[in-house]
Amino acid sequence: MSMIKTENLCKSFHSLEVLKNVSITVEQGEVVCIVGPSGAGKSTFLRALNNLETINSGKIYIEDVLVEDRDNILTNKVKLPKAQRLAIMLELGMVFQRFNLFPHLTSLENIMIAQTQVRKRSEAQAREKALALLERVGLTDKADEYPNKMSGGQQQRLAIARALAMDPKVMLFDEPTSALDPELVGEVLDVMKDLAKDGITMVVVTHEMGFAKDVADRVIFMDDGMVLEDAPPSEFFTNPKNERLREFLRRILTKEQ
């Protein structure tokens, strides 16, 4: 089963074309990393999947269900009942560049709140799951801490735990380490690597080439709103076919040296 499939997604902000016929498929259990320069459309693509941006044209399928069909919007070809659409969108968990935590809630409460209000779990059920997830991301001792008392890396790990609490079938990561100090990046990437080992389907917009090389099943290169290359890491990094990708990798490698 394809967990995510897009067909010819287009998105413009006024006269600026941000996505140009983006077609990507992500299979169950795959880890797909999307890389490219700033302004390539990577984050907009991720936000379109999660219904945070409305596409101008194209189709989006989640678990083979057509949830967005902007090509036939006038004929109402796709009009899912609100409850069904909500249930499908809950299958996508998202972690942002900025942590988007509730500052007035403790770590434990941040993980519990959506469970009780959206998933309608009891306080006891939500608390049990929250404690297990805090342990999973190495934050057991931070259960009663407020986000502003935690490091950036700890806050991002908490944000991952909060997303996992909803039992999503797909995790979307929008440059989850870009707001972190360099010494904190590793602790977040380690949690993400563990998720990949557990077989969770992941779509990761990232500038961490080492992570993409080591963890991804496929790496996608986007530039100027288009997919220019889609290949396994072994091929992507050692034998890129697209000239723009070759130039991009040369610049990245030069910076890392």
Image (cartoon, rainbow, N blue to C red):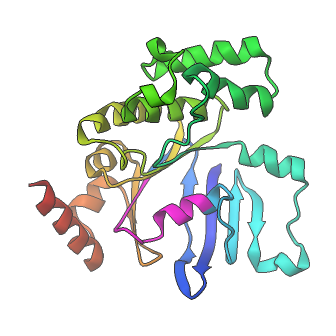
Tally the numbered discs: 0
Residue 59 in the magenta stretch? The answer is no
Q: Is residue 159 visible?
A: yes
Residue sticking out furthest to the bottom: 15
What residue appears at the point 88 percent right and 52 percent down from the top-left corner? Answer: 82
Q: Nearer the viewer, residue 230 or 255?
A: 255
Q: Nearer the viewer, residue 227 or 253?
A: 253
Q: Position of residue 38 (x, y in %)?
A: 37, 68
Q: Quadrant of the C terminus?
A: bottom left
Q: Position of residue 56 (x, y in %)?
A: 68, 78
Q: Is residue 194 visible?
A: no
Image position of 153 (left or right of 201): left
What residue appears at the point 58 percent right and 14 percent down from the top-left corner? Answer: 131
Residue sticking out furthest to the left: 257
What residue appears at the point 64 percent right and 37 percent down from the top-left corner? Answer: 168
Q: Start and end of the magenta stretch?
A: 33-47
Q: Quadrant of residue 214?
A: top left
Whether 80 is drawn above or below 30: the answer is below
Residue 42 in the magenta stretch? The answer is yes
Q: Position of residue 177 (x, y in %)?
A: 37, 45
Q: Quadrant of residue 215?
A: top left
Q: Position of residue 71 (x, y in %)?
A: 75, 79
Image position of 12 (left or right of 75): left
Whether 159 is drawn above or below 54: the answer is above
What residue appears at the point 54 percent right and 65 percent down from the top-left corner? Answer: 44
Q: Quadrant of residue 185?
A: top left
Image position of 98 (left or right of 169): left
